[in-house]
Amino acid sequence: MTVNGGVSFWYREIGLPSRRRPLDRSIDVDVCIVGGGYTGLWAAYYLKKGDPGLRIAVLERSFAGYGASGRNGGWITAALAGSRRRFAATHGRQAVLDLQRAMNDSVDEIIAVAAAEGIEADIVKNGMLRVAHAPAQLPRLRQQVVTAQEWDDDVVLLDAEETVARIGVAGALGAAYTPHCARVQPAKLVQGLARAVERLGVAIYESTPVTGITPHVAETPYGTVKAGFVIRATEGFTAGLPGERRTWLPMNSSLIVTEPLGERFWARIGWTGRELLGDVSHAYIYAQRTADDRIAIGGRGWPYRFGSRTDNDGRTRAATVRQLRDALVRLFPSTVDAEIAHAWSGVLGVPRDWCSTVGLDRRRGLGWAGGYVGHGVATANLAGRTLRDLVLGADTTLTRLPWVGRKVRRWEPEPLRWLGVQGMYMAYREADRQEVVAGRVTSSRLARIADMVARRD
């Protein structure tokens, strides 16, 4: 039977953590971090390393790593969480190149910290392939590679033979390959990071919902936390805070994972390098070969719940499970009889211009980071190091990156944003149907129109 929800397969593998004690009184600290995921924990880690004397408290509604940090597809990717064009429009070309270099470095930084802190998280850095498996996708893939190379990105185009030699994707016509990506078991990483943060002397209060954030103050049902700086690190759950309903849209992403697949399957498919796998469809998928030889594959599923509501412990619609299974079988037809062991969902934060942001208002003592649009594992690490420098008042190459202090307009009120997101993904799915199922040989205009309406271009 397929397990549905229960947070994620990653936690089914290692077991849900025991809860840390909640806040039980009002306290004063130097830095209060709201949210115990990657962003909050990396910020706490680097701040405590940068100034061991800081009093830091992390407030978490559930348990550290409950949200996207413990549910994602396990990609430590250097892909920018935003548009090069938009960042360049405000800061110039060199600033974008600097941001990409910082993202590349973040992949290696996570690997280095995991090794230094003894965090065993099944990390393998062997890059990522984005595969074209329909005729209409190949010209789009080639153009994406050309554009990436114009920005000095380390992306190369593989032909069909080179692609299949790495991963035996059915109908593969070519792929874009980047070395700046690593596989990870995300729950192992976030739980190891939480333990490392505690060893440094940071207090993590779990089962402690924050009911409001004002300058220098975080309110909870159990007491008030006063701080020199309060950092909002709530990503996909940001809309649940007072006054933040339209700040970032909580977009759902869903995954399934197969049973362990046998030696005969892997002998046919290859995938010996355990690269990450994506495709060039408009409603794209992302996948990994797990440490115990399963395939975990994800996609958007049911992208948005009316009123910015979020899911309950990752439970996933049956239709989404079927869509992901269909995508799996399309890429690897010999998985048609494979059992689906687990399905789950999580939420990610999406700003109105689809560009991530990090910042600090020193006068009000309020900081923030997020809006990672699905590229949060590595971006959260960069955010943590950047927040360290901002809080400590250091002028560094990180604090001068183009996403620092970026402000965007808020999302439309309901029902406009629900209608917009549903319409956007209906268009993407129809465009994919035309290209993949019906055999259209040129890219569908529907997807381009959807990009323009959503401001993703």
Image (spheres, rainbow, N blue to C red):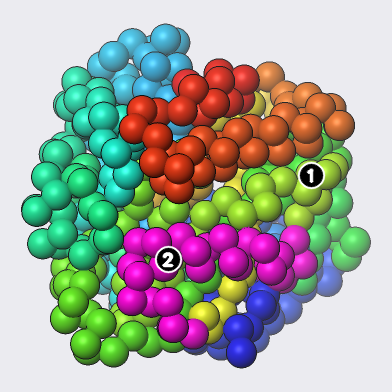
Is 13 contained in the magenta span?
A: no
Residue beneath label 2, please? 328
Is 316 contained in the magenta span?
A: yes
Query: Viewer-proximal residue, 331 or 302?
Result: 331
Instruction: Indicate the amino acid at tag 2.
Output: Leu
The residue under the point 78% across, 48% down is: 305
Instruction: Indicate the amino acid at tag 1.
Output: Ser
Q: Toward which corner of the image does residue 159 lie, by quadrant?
A: top left
Q: Is mark 2 on a helix, strand or loop?
A: helix
Mark 1 residue crowding within 10 angstroms, few (<14) / some (14–19) / many (20+): many
Left or right relative to 215: residue 274: left
Residue beneath label 1, please? 308
Q: How many marks?
A: 2
The residue under the point 16% across, 81% down is: 267
Horizontal and vertical percent position of residue 75: 37, 58
Left or right relative to 428: residue 288: left
Q: Is mark 1 on a helix, strand or loop?
A: helix
Q: Upstream in the sequence, badge 2 or badge 1? A: 1
Q: What residue span does the magenta drawing correspond to?
A: 311-339
Horizontal and vertical percent position of residue 252: 64, 52
Left or right relative to 273: residue 391: right
Query: Viewer-proximal residue, 410 or 264?
Result: 264
Horizontal and vertical percent position of residue 74: 41, 63
Q: In which quarter of the image is the N terminus?
A: bottom right
Mark 2 residue crowding within 10 angstroms, few (<14) / some (14–19) / many (20+): many
Q: Toward which corner of the image does residue 452 lie, by quadrant?
A: top right
The residue under the point 42% across, 77% down is: 336
Query: Viewer-proximal residue, 331 or 285?
Result: 331
Vertical position of residue 189 compared to residue 444: above or below: below
